[in-house]
């Protein structure tokens, strides 16, 4: 390959092969076919927290449970058709309530992950989010999360279990969440590590 670059007169430092993006919060993990016989089959996980020494955490964005948050918490008001679904965020602490929201401004109790995507947890924060921001574009609620010990996610990525791609906020709040994995597969075909 180096010889071909030299023959063509291209500098050897020219990188013709795309490097995988660095793992960091705000990325998508797209399950590869090697996970097809696992609970992570066809999942897309949005990484909400990542540190090489602490591990990683994220929520599965494409697994709607079929339950409405308003049915589970009838006193909460402010959900629309898209924001009212409860999603299965992952197998860790399935009783935990986690929230992703699009907002132009930072709110107390919310952590900006990337662009206008914020993360929060708990019923109190959800109630506050529903009341406080009239400019809020979208809200998604999750039961549980996916988590990795230090080094575990990096090992799974190097094994080829996950494709790491920059998150697309529109896909997090896609009105057809069950199609998100296929959309990412189509857009990123051939980029598997």
Image (cartoon, grey):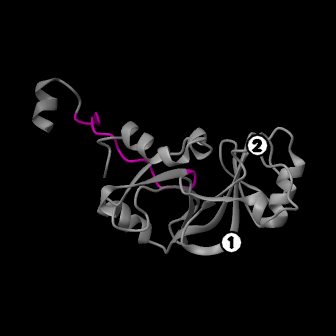
Q: Position of residue 43 (x, y in %)?
A: 46, 56
Q: Position of residue 44 (x, y in %)?
A: 48, 53
Say which of marks 1 and 2 sits in front: 1
* Residue on which the image places disc 1: 96
Q: Are marks 1 and 2 in contact (CB under 8 Å)?
A: no
| Quarter occupied by the N terminus | top left
Main SS of the magenta part reads loop
Q: Position of residue 192 (x, y in %)?
A: 31, 49
Q: Is residue 165 visible?
A: no
Of residues 101 and 154, the one nearer the viewer is: 101
Q: Is residue 23 visible?
A: yes
The secondary structure type at the circle numbered 1 is: strand
Q: Decide whether residue 24 is among the magenta residues.
A: yes
Q: Residue furthest top?
A: 9
Q: Residues within 10 Å of mark 2 (few under 14, many from 20)?
A: many
In the image, residue 77 above or below residue 4: below
* Residue on which the image places disc 2: 103
> Residue at the spot x=88%, y=62% of the render?
75
- Magenta segment boundaries in residue numbering: 12-26
Q: Decide whether residue 37 is among the magenta residues.
A: no
Q: Is residue 154 left or right of residue 53?
A: left
The residues bearing labels 1 and 2 have C-alpha atoms spaced at a distance of 22 Å
Of residues 5 and 35, the one nearer the viewer is: 35
Q: Is residue 131 left or right of residue 47?
A: right
Q: Residues within 10 Å of mark 1 (few under 14, many from 20)?
A: some
Of residues 73 and 101, the one nearer the viewer is: 73
Locate residue 12: give its quadrant. top left
The secondary structure type at the circle numbered 2 is: loop
> Residue at the spot x=41%, y=55% of the render?
42
Mark 1 / mark 2, whichever is N-terminal: 1
């Amino acid at each position: 390959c180096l010889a071909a670059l030299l023959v063509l007169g291209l500098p050897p430092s020219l990188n013709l092969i795309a490097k995988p993006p660095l793992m960091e919060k705000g990325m998508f993990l797209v399950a590869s076919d090697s996970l097809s016989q696992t609970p992570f089959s066809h999942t897309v996980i949005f990484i909400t927290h990542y540190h090489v020494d602490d591990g990683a955490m994220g929520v599965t964005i494409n697994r709607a449970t079929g339950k409405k948050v308003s049915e589970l918490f009838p006193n909460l008001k402010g959900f629309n058709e898209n924001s009212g679904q409860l999603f299965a965020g992952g197998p860790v602490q399935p009783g935990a309530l986690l929230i992703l929201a699009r907002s132009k401004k930072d709110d107390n109790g919310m952590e900006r992950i990337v662009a206008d995507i914020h993360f929060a947890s708990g019923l109190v924060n959800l109630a506050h989010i529903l009341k406080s921001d009239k400019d809020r574009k979208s809200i998604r609620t999750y039961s549980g999360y996916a988590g990795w010990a230090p080094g575990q996610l990096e090992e799974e990525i190097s094994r080829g279990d996950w494709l790491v791609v920059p998150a697309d906020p529109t896909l997090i709040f896609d009105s057809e969440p069950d199609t998100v994995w296929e959309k990412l597969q189509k857009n990123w075909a051939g980029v598997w590590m």
